[in-house]
Image: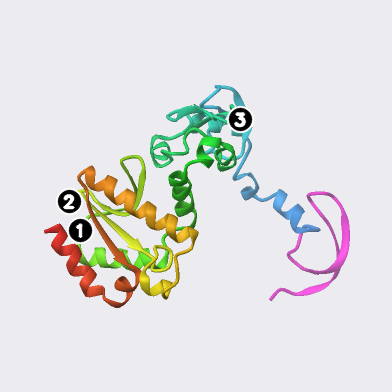
């Protein structure tokens, strides 16, 4: 520890005379003044750089900076993007190929807000289901079904649009097999109805299941449906049924 005592000093940086209990080696009135004289204070000097987009000269302390502005940076990042014009607001926007491919049903819109305003989108229950699925993610039944498929070791895709009209839970492309995980209540299993008549939503869902299955079978797909209680309580049966269909 240094020795402290009351004394005066004249700061060599700002020439201010201060008095206090200072260490005998202290020369500066403050850390700010001390830092202005340190060699490290110029480790990030202001330098002139050439913008890689507009070729204008700009000042910066960051030697890694390549662009003079956020606008030029956005232009550089958009250089390999495909440009689109929003169907609703007419604003031009760019998407990379990978992002455009993942947004197959939204590429006409610059944002979800604009997409939701589109009348064609609002009238399409299939596209609305895709949007809802992407927003909420898989439910517990779908996760349990996924575990079974992973145990089998077959390649599969989830939430696939078949023939541009049928959104299915699972598609096994190598075998042309469609798998649907049916919730007992929403798809109207007799045990869940408890001898009651299906309500309007259940009837609509049951009717849609029927016509979608008929259409996909005509297209040459094999359809497998498993009830929620089967996936939860009889996993081995579901496992074996899928394996037999694959073989």
Name the side, left or right, on which 200 lies relative to 236. Answer: right
* Element class at badge 3: loop
Name the side, left or right, on which 165 lies relative to 214. Answer: right
Q: Specify the quadrant that holds the N terminus.
A: bottom right
Q: Which residues are magenta?
A: 1-27
| Magenta span includes 23 | yes
Is residue 246 positioned above or below 52 on the image? Answer: below
Q: Disc 1 designates what residue?
A: 154
Mark sitting on residue 175: 2
Asked if the residues shown at circle 3 and circle 1 are in contact, with their CB atoms under 8 angstroms apart, the answer is no
Mark sitting on residue 89: 3
Q: Which residue sits furthest top?
A: 55
Sequence order check, earlier mark of 2 and 1: 1
Asked if the residues shown at circle 2 and circle 1 are in contact, with their CB atoms under 8 angstroms apart, the answer is yes
* Element class at badge 1: loop
> Alpha carbon of mark 3 to alpha carbon of mark 1: how far?
44 Å
Q: Is residue 163 visible?
A: yes
Sequence order check, earlier mark of 3 and 1: 3
Residue under the image location 88 percent in, 60 percent down: 18
């Amino acid at each position: 520890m240094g020795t402290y005592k009351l004394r005066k000093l004249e700061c060599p940086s700002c020439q201010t005379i201060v008095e206090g209990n200072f260490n005998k080696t202290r020369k500066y009135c403050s850390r700010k003044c001390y830092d202005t004289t340190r060699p490290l204070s110029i480790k990030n000097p202001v330098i002139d750089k050439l913008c890689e987009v507009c070729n204008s000269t700009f000042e910066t302390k960051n030697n890694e900076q390549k662009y003079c502005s956020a606008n030029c940076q956005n232009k550089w990042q958009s250089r390999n993007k495909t440009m689109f014009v929003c169907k609703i607001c007419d604003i031009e926007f760019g998407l990379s190929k990978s992002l455009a491919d993942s947004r197959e049903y939204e590429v006409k819109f610059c944002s979800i807000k604009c997409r939701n305003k589109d009348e064609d989108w609002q009238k399409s229950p299939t596209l609305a289901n895709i949007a809802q699925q992407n927003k909420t993610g898989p439910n517990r039944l779908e996760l349990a079904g996924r575990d079974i498929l992973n145990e089998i070791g077959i390649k599969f895709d989830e939430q696939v649009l078949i023939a541009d009209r049928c959104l299915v839970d699972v598609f096994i492309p190598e075998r042309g097999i469609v798998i649907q995980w049916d919730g007992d209540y929403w798809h109207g299993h007799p045990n869940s109805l408890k001898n009651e008549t299906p309500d309007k939503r259940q009837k609509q869902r049951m009717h849609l299941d029927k016509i979608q299955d008929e259409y996909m079978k005509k297209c040459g797909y094999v359809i497998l449906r498993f009830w929620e209680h089967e996936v939860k309580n009889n996993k081995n049966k579901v496992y074996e049924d899928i394996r037999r269909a694959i073989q």
